[in-house]
Amino acid sequence: MKFFPKQLIDGYRTFATQRLPTEQSRYQDLSERGQFPETMVIGCCDSRVSPEVIFDAGPGELFVVRNIANLVPVYQPDSNAHGVSAALEYAVTVLKVKNIVVLGHAQCGGIRAFVDKIKPLTPGDFIGKWMQMFIKPGEIVEQREHETMQDFVVRIEKAAVFRSLENLMTFPFVRERVESGEMQLHGAYFGVAEGSLFVLDRGAKEFISVRDELKSDQ
């Protein structure tokens, strides 16, 4: 199959000969009964941050939507097409997921471009317009005094998780299920280099290391 990427064919060969035989019955069941994932993950397109890998999830366990910088727009019931909003509506109203996780990560290219204001990432192109939803009208995002660029970028990467969680609550069908206790919203942050995971403590407004928590449980 010279017309298709060899890497993908090789990957499927491994899947078909090694993984599929052990999961064939699960795929058959999912085909017949449909999918019933309990968790939706809103993550970044970054190839290093795969929710299925990070959370060791099998087929049918996660409903995933990925975009630049794991952003959720505000609720806009207009005539335009809204990909993230459509996926969100399906997850909440059709699949009735119990959890929505916004998964941010280190070294996010979208956030870095936003911070550096790299051309052509201006409000006139697709990425520029997409990243503009990160800030509210009149809001100024800038580096603090004595803050290193690395710390600034990390702060904005984590702030994107907070903003997406905030925007989720502008959707009536999300707010209704959260307020009724049928669904919970969560934030998480993945450190690419170390493979570390941090989850958001909404009360303390800080990210807690899962690895440290696992060590304390041993």
Image (cartoon, helix red, strand yellow):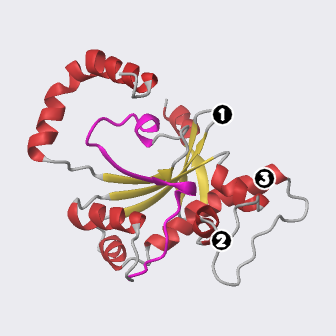
Residue under circle 3? 151
**Is residue 9 rendered magenta in the image?**
no
Q: Is residue 6 visible?
A: yes
Identify the amino acid type marked 2. Answer: Gly
Identify the amino acid type marked 3. Answer: Asp
Would you identify the image quadrant in which residue 76 lies? bottom left
Residue under circle 2? 124
Real-space Cα separation, disc 1 to disc 2, in angstroms: 33 Å
Q: Nearer the viewer, residue 191 or 118?
A: 118
- Under tag 3, what secondary structure? helix
Q: Is residue 204 visible?
A: no
- Under tag 2, what secondary structure? loop
Q: Nearer the viewer, residue 114 or 61?
A: 114
Q: Decide which of tag 1 and tag 2 comes sooner along the chain.
A: 2
Q: Are marks 1 and 2 in contact (CB under 8 Å)?
A: no
Residue under circle 1? 193
